[in-house]
């Protein structure tokens, strides 16, 4: 009897002894099914904190580097973009991009016929490549976020724990494990537990929540508490001052929602167009030129317009919400949107959540300046713009509203934020009936199917 089998035998004997004493078979079954979720949630929380710390370290390092010498943009940015792209292209191409479409595709593949294909989308290799590639991107000034990658990392952790369960362990649904992992990842990344739950319901699940609600809630709680235990209780953005709102400010919220909804949807279409352009480049030399040009464009943005308009965008959001410089110039939203397109289309790892929020914040800021609004009214339009732009890309108005609500702890704004999400979701349909994530999910599923077919043909 080898060591692994002996260990499993000891665990089974220990569990049998414990639950035989209680005489409750249902309790035993529920406990065994819950354990994998608890373990995976704890690991997810630890990984989310580790990832956020090195991501923030790289972003702060880049800001200090480029602030001291703007000319370094033209050297460091293309070099980092190339490294980030090469890591993905060489080691795991499905680790590129946001990570959320990969998780959605994995959930769709979580069935007896296709479950083996999930290994390309969620794995330990994906976690390593995702972290390395995105850290190089953010150090180069890439307009990316870490929230989408955190969700793919969490999905990979939950899938791996599910794989490691011994044969005698009660069966745990692969689909439910992945969905729960994604929710836990979002909760840990933003410190938004309700956002993680709503995200799972609105974006991921096609299964009635009653089948996995306990696992979902406990996973979000454990991952969130782990992150809080290491970071401390924190808000992603902070407490913007919002009081004495104008009676008619809801009209401004609707206007901002309409513009940001269109802006988010248009950005999604541009992202797809640039990615399709890149896929038509047949050899590595052409792709290297494309990635280098994208890096040079971002370098030019940073050099001309400043470091605050490149990177994840958190500095832009905190700047307009918590300083006296509330009104950005008219070109700020365009630079943020274009920066996201040029960064994401390289194929390197990086999310669109934070860039989308910052683009919406820029639009809200610009429009508030045009309307000469007070600070409180301006803050409301900035938050509404964040909800509207994120909704335009993801088509998840409730998730967007709850995330922004929890990031700022401004519960009295819930109806304004939901109003923004509602109008942004409706108007975005004029540009595209499907979300950016839906398009990317189909893209990944086709790639996997094509590769599986090629492999089968080669074997035959």
Image (spheres, grey):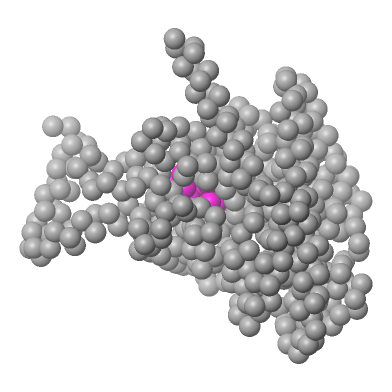
Instruction: Look at the image and tell me whether residue 160 can be seen.
Output: yes
Left or right of residue 371: residue 230: left
Q: Residue at x 81, y 70 (%)?
A: 255
Question: In the rendered image of this protein, does residue 294 appear above or below residue 210?
Answer: above
The residue sitting at the bottom extreme is: 244
Left or right of residue 97: residue 142: right
Left or right of residue 453: residue 140: right
- The main secondary structure of the magenta stretch is helix
The residue sitting at the top extreme is: 460
Which quadrant: the C terminus? top left
Q: Nearer the viewer, residue 367 or 185?
A: 367
Q: Residue at x 52, y 27 (%)?
A: 449
Question: In the rendered image of this protein, does residue 98 appear above or below residue 403?
Answer: above
Residue 294, image quadrant: top right
Location of residue 401 in the rendering, given as x and y in whole percent from the top left corner: 63, 68
Q: Residue at x 88, y 45 (%)?
A: 300
Location of residue 336 in the rendering, given as x and y in whole percent from the top left corner: 80, 54
**Region in magenta:** 150-157
Question: In the rendered image of this protein, does residue 383 appear above or below residue 184?
Answer: below
Location of residue 262 in the rendering, given as x and y in whole percent from the top left corner: 78, 57
The answer to whether residue 155 is magenta is yes
Question: In the rendered image of this protein, does residue 37 appear above or below residue 235?
Answer: above
């Amino acid at each position: 009897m080898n060591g692994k089998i002996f260990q499993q035998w000891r665990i089974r004997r220990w569990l049998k002894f414990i639950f035989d004493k209680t005489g409750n078979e249902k309790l035993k079954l529920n406990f065994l099914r819950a354990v994998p979720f608890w373990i995976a949630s704890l690991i997810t929380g630890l990984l989310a904190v580790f990832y956020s710390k090195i991501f923030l370290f790289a972003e702060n390092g880049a800001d200090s580097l480029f602030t001291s010498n703007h000319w370094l943009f033209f050297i460091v940015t293309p070099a980092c973009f190339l490294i980030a792209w090469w890591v993905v292209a060489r080691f795991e191409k499905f680790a590129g991009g946001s990570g959320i479409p990969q998780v959605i595709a994995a959930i769709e593949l979580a069935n007896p016929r296709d479950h083996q294909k999930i290994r390309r989308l969620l794995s330990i290799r994906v976690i390593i490549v995702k972290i390395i590639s995105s850290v190089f991107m953010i150090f180069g000034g890439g307009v990316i976020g870490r929230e989408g990658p955190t969700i793919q990392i969490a999905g990979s952790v939950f899938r791996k724990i599910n794989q490691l369960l011994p044969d005698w362990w009660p069966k745990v649904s692969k689909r439910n494990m992945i969905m729960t992992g994604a929710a836990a990842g979002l909760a840990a990344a933003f410190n938004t537990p309700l956002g993680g739950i709503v995200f799972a319901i609105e974006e991921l699940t096609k299964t009635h929540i009653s089948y996995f609600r306990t696992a979902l809630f406990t996973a979000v709680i454990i991952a969130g508490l782990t992150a809080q235990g290491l970071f401390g209780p924190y808000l992603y953005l902070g407490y913007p001052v919002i009081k004495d709102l104008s009676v008619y400010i809801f009209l401004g919220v609707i206007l901002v929602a309409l513009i940001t909804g269109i802006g988010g949807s248009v950005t999604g279409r541009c992202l797809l167009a640039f990615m399709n352009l890149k896929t038509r480049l047949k050899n590595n030399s052409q792709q290297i030129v494309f990635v280098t040009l994208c890096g040079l464009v971002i370098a030019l943005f940073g050099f001309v317009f400043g470091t605050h308009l490149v990177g994840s965008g958190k500095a832009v959001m905190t700047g307009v919400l918590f300083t006296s410089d509330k009104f950005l110039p008219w070109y700020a939203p365009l630079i943020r949107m274009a920066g996201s397109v040029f960064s994401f289309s390289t194929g390197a790892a990086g999310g669109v959540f934070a860039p989308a929020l910052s683009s919406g914040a820029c639009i809200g800021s610009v429009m508030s300046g045009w309307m000469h609004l007070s600070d409180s009214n301006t803050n409301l339009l900035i938050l509404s713009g964040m909800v509207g732009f994120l909704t335009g890309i993801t088509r998840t108005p409730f998730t967007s509203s709850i995330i922004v609500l929890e990031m700022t702890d401004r519960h009295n704004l819930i109806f304004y934020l939901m109003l923004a999400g509602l109008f942004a979701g409706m108007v975005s349909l004029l540009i595209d009936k499907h979300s950016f994530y839906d398009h990317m999910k189909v893209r990944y599923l086709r790639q996997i199917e094509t590769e599986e077919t090629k492999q089968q043909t080669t074997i035959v």
